Amino acid sequence: MQEYLTDAVVLNSEPNGDLDSRVSLFTKQFGKLTAKAKSARKITSKLSGHLQPGNLIQARLVEKNGLQIVDALKQQALNISPANLYFLDRLLAETEPDLKLWQILVEEKFDWQEILKLLGWDPKEARCAGCNAAAPSFFYVRDQEFFCKSCAANLSKDDIIHL
């Protein structure tokens, strides 16, 4: 059984079964990790308040039938919207650390232009996937493509990042 102690930003938390949660974390050392939090949705859970999206936490993780969060302590609440963290969770690959992204999150300098550039999608070099117009102003997370305002009007609003 392997144990890890790390600082992490909580990206997303989803129900997993009746009382458990599946939590996505971004850590400085390991990149994005997804771990199970047993009984995190119980009303008496000691973990639930700490595992809210946007919290910078210190987490103790154990590798036992997958990764499990056994302890978490909130250090601070970051001023980053849960919607932005949800989209970031969808874009990040597992176990790929990125020190620049970590600094952006911890220093609360969240900027989609900079983050997309770090992840390999440079908005300054992009063109609209619909009409090939220069300087698109939207990123469609589902297809990982850029769109101009008129072409983005036809897309699902739940999957669009405004740059």
Image: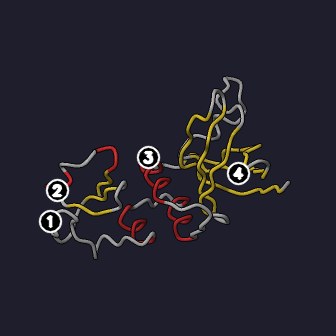
Which residue lies at the image location 72% right of the left edge and 44% below the top edge? 72
Q: What separation in Å lies between label 4 and label 3 (alpha carbons)?
A: 20 Å
- Please give left or right for residue 13 compared with residue 140 in the image: right
- Mark 3, mark 2: which one is toward the viewer? 2
Tell me whether circle 4 and circle 2 mark residues in contact (CB < 8 Å). no
User: What amino acid type should be assigned to the residue bearing mark 3?
Assistant: Ser
| Secondary element at tag 4 | strand
Of the image marks 1 and 4, the number of the one nearer the N terminus: 4
Residue reaching furthest to the front = 65
User: What amino acid type should be assigned to the residue bearing mark 2?
Assistant: Cys
Which residue lies at the image location 72% right of the left edge and 50% below the top edge? 67
Would you identify the image quadrant in which residue 31 lies?
A: bottom right
The residue at which mark 3 appears reads as: 81
Instruction: Classify the position of the C terminus by image quarter.
Output: bottom left
- Mark 1, mark 3: which one is toward the viewer? 1
The location of residue 158, given as percent across then percent down, is 33, 44
Q: What colour scheme does the image use?
A: secondary structure
Instruction: Classify the position of the N terminus by image quarter.
Output: bottom right
- Mark 4, mark 2: which one is toward the viewer? 2
Tell me whether circle 2 and circle 1 mark residues in contact (CB < 8 Å). yes
The residue at which mark 2 appears reads as: 151
Q: What separation in Å lies between label 3 and label 2 (alpha carbons)?
A: 25 Å
Of the image marks 2 and 1, the number of the one nearer the N terminus: 1
Q: What separation in Å lies between label 4 and label 2 (alpha carbons)?
A: 42 Å
The residue at which mark 4 appears reads as: 58
